[in-house]
């Protein structure tokens, strides 16, 4: 039990042992430097420092604990500082009066003028060290809590983005499933072998979604398999109205966000006209440390208003994963989105 207690509180015990005598010796050096070499003065300093220091620190710790429940440093730092200094100064003054009464009046029998002088001097030193101590101690406390609050805020933002991205995927999946089931209905009557292959590829897409929906990133080789599967389904649905050119390396040591390429491809199909005379041309290629999804622009005349939350969410998520940004470029002829390829998992 004593060993566990020491292991748990040894830092606090060390502070309680070192701080009072350190301050006492510092005051001696400031007020009476030659006293540092006199045994009787050093003995007096040890007794005096611990008599005041330990009770002061114990009660100050209680004051800090109670104030933290009522006036947090992060919420009202100035008010907390003033009240802390005031309460600890009052306690120090009372403690000095008690110790001086016992030591100087009862034990040593000093006259009142000398006791008064030493009490005032002790109080001045105490006030200085209290202000410095409160500033130092609580600056460290404030910084640690501020830093932790900043970390918590980043974690919260990251979790919100993950939820938003999950919502985005959940919006796309039913839409994607409905369109493919509609295509499958007509395909069953035309070509049963192709319909069977279509069902198999559609199952692969949703197997991927179930497997990687909780994953933050996937390797490029895995994402390419999904994209090729999705491309197969799109080519059957749109035939010559959609021209897909996918040129990606199968790399297992480079990563992207799961389904991000499918989302960008779905986005291009959703916002543009597709016809055999004017096919939608989509290129998905790697260019250095980026993958771009580029399509020719032939916007639909009647389309539901887009708030571009999908693209904004992708941009925000990549800010947490990479120092490289998602680039969006739109001209009169084409729309191009470039996403960074990650070299390692976050």
Image: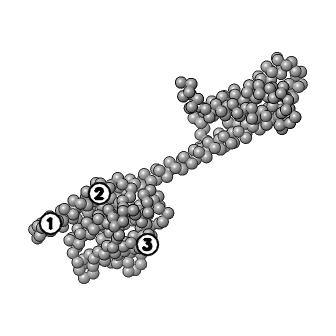
Quadrant in which residue 242 is drawn: bottom left
Number of the label disc, if any, that sits on residue 30? none
Question: Which residue corresponds to mark 2?
Answer: 209
How far apart in space, not on screen, are marks 3 and 2 (Cα)? Answer: 28 Å
Give the colouring mode of the picture: one colour
Element class at badge 1: helix
Q: Are marks 3 and 2 in contact (CB under 8 Å)?
A: no
Near mark 3 (Cα within 10 A), the count class, few <14, some 14-19 or many ≥20, is few
Q: CA distance from mark 3 to mark 1?
A: 38 Å
**Horizontal side, residue 165 vs residue 77: left or right:** left
Residue nearest the viewer, comparing 296 with 47: 47
Disc 3 target residue? 288
Decide which of tag 3 and tag 2 comes sooner along the chain.
Answer: 2
- Image coordinates for residue 333, horizontal then vertical, percent: 38, 80
Residue drawn at x 47%, y 66% as measured from the top left: 325
Residue 264 percent location from the top left of the image: 35, 67
Residue 311 falls left or right of residue 208: right
Q: Is residue 284 left or right of residue 187?
A: right
Image position, residue 259 (x, y; %): 33, 62
Q: Secondary structure at mark 2?
A: helix
Q: Earlier in the sequence, mark 2 or mark 1?
A: 1
- The residue depicted at 25 percent of the width and 66 percent of the height is 229
In contact (CB < 8 Å): disc 2 and disc 1:
no
Q: Quadrant of the C terminus?
A: bottom left
Residue corresponding to mark 1: 195
Query: Vertical placement of 84 versus 172: above or below?
Result: above
Residue found at x 23% / y 80%: 276
């Amino acid at each position: 039990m004593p060993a566990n207690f020491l292991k748990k509180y040894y830092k606090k015990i060390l502070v309680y042992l070192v701080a009072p005598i350190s301050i006492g010796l510092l005051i001696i050096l400031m007020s009476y430097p030659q006293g540092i070499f006199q045994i009787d003065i050093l003995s007096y300093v040890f007794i005096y420092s611990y008599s005041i220091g330990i009770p002061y620190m114990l009660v100050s710790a209680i004051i800090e604990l109670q104030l933290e429940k009522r006036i947090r440093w992060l919420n009202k730092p100035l008010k907390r500082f003033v009240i802390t200094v005031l309460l600890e100064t009052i306690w120090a003054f009372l403690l000095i009066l008690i110790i001086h009464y016992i030591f100087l009046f009862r034990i040593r029998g000093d006259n009142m003028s000398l006791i008064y002088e030493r009490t005032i001097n002790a109080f001045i030193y105490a006030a200085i060290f209290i202000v410095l101590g409160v500033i130092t101690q609580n600056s460290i406390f404030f910084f640690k809590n501020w830093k932790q609050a900043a970390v918590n805020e980043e974690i919260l933002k990251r979790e919100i983005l993950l939820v938003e991205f999950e919502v985005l995927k959940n919006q796309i999946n039913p839409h994607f499933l409905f369109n493919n089931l509609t295509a499958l209905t007509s395909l069953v009557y035309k070509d049963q072998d192709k319909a069977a292959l279509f069902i198999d590829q559609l199952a692969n897409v949703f197997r991927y979604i179930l497997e990687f929906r909780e994953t933050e990133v996937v390797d490029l080789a895995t994402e390419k398999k999904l994209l090729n599967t999705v491309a197969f389904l799109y080519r059957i649905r749109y035939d010559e109205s959609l021209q897909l050119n996918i040129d990606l390396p199968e790399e297992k040591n480079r990563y992207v966000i799961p389904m991000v390429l499918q989302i960008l491809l779905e986005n291009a199909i959703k916002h543009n006209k597709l016809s055999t005379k004017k096919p939608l041309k989509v290129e998905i290629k790697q260019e250095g440390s980026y993958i771009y999804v580029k399509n020719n622009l032939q916007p639909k005349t009647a389309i539901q208003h887009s708030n571009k939350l999908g693209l904004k969410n992708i941009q925000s998520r990549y800010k947490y994963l990479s120092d490289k940004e998602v680039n969006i470029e739109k001209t009169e002829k084409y729309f191009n989105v470039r996403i960074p390829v990650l070299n390692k998992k976050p």
